[in-house]
Amino acid sequence: MQHSKYDQTLALAGIYQAASLVKQVANTGKANAAQVESSLESLFRFDVNTVEEVYGSVAGVSHGLKLLCRHLQDKTTRDVEITKYVLSLIMLERKLSANSVMLDTIDKRLKEIESQFDFFSLDHDNTYAKLGQLYKDTISTLGPKIIVSGEQPFLSNEHNASKVRALLLAGIRSAVLWRQCGGSRWQFLFGRNAYIRECEAILRSI
């Protein structure tokens, strides 16, 4: 994959999109179905040539692009909760990247889940349950755990809890992609203007 700012921006937007959807599910019990599908589908695109293909298309991560652009442009309107999730996902990905055994486990189990799509769709309760369990068995053990804030009636619902974990797993997928494209925490902290320019250019093209 090319290590361009364009690719980095799409991957970073993927992290933001997953984080935003986590917040929506935790606080309302629902989220935009198309956005959720785009984020979760990224988990099952194993052999791709471009970052766009990971999300199906640029439009698949448009929600994340808009959110990323808004967060970078204006600190006063930045969602602290979403930012916290994004930073936690980036930090957990660094730990995951150093654990080859866990990476292999995740890859194997995602392929097992994919093999059942003839019986259970991506949006099926069974798929969410398996993705949620995968997150619990792997990423959740790396520590520190991501504490998701929200409304207790929604958080205590097992389907919502599985969906939140599945989306966090998708966020990790985008964080892996971002690092593979040359992204780093230093760029995230100090390369804001370059990301803003790229975001604006991409959004104009959609």
Image (spheres, grey):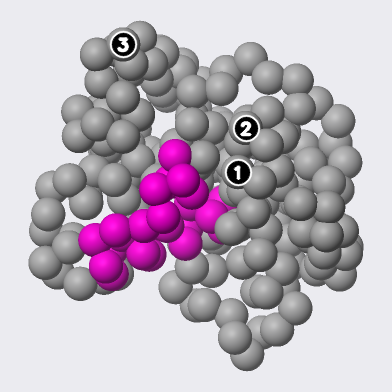
Confirm whether residue 190 shows in the render: no
Is disc 1 surrounded by few (<14), some (14 to 19) or many (20+) residues within 10 Å? many
Residue 183 position within the rendered picture, expressed as x and y whole percent measured from the top left: 75, 47
Pick the front one: 69 or 168: 69
Helix, strand or loop at label 3? It is loop
Instruction: Tell me, for residue 118, which label it has, or none.
Output: 3
* Region of the chain picked out in magenta, as a range: 15-37
Q: Position of residue 36 (x, y in %)?
A: 43, 46
What's the CA distance linking mark 2 and mark 3?
Answer: 20 Å
**Res 187 quadrant in image:** bottom right
Residue at image location 70% in from the left, 84% down from the top: 74
**Could you tell which of marks 2 and 3 lies nearer the N-terminus?**
2
Left/right of residue 200 with respect to residue 177 in the rendered view: right
Label at residue 56? 2
How much space separates mark 3 and mark 1, taking CA atoms? 23 Å
Disc 1: which residue: 60
Left or right of 84? Residue 174 is right
Mark 3 vs 1: CB contact within 8 A: no
The amino acid marked with disc number 3 is Asp
- Quadrant position of the N terminus in the picture: top right
Q: What is the x, y in percent for residue 46? A: 57, 18
Q: Give the residue furthest to the bottom.
A: 76
Amino acid type of the residue tagged 2 in the rendering:
Gly
- Asked if the stretch drawn in magenta spans residue 137, the answer is no
Q: Residue at x 64, y 54 (%)?
A: 62
The verdict on residue 30 being magenta is yes
- Image height of 48 relative to 17, above or below: above
Q: Residues within 10 Å of mark 2 (few under 14, many from 20)?
A: some
Q: Nearer the viewer, residue 136 or 156?
A: 156
Circle 3 packing at 10 Å, graded few (<14), some (14-19), many (20+), is few
Kindly indicate whether the residue at mark 2 contacts the one at mark 1 (C-beta within 8 angstroms): yes
Q: Amino acid at mark 1?
A: Gly
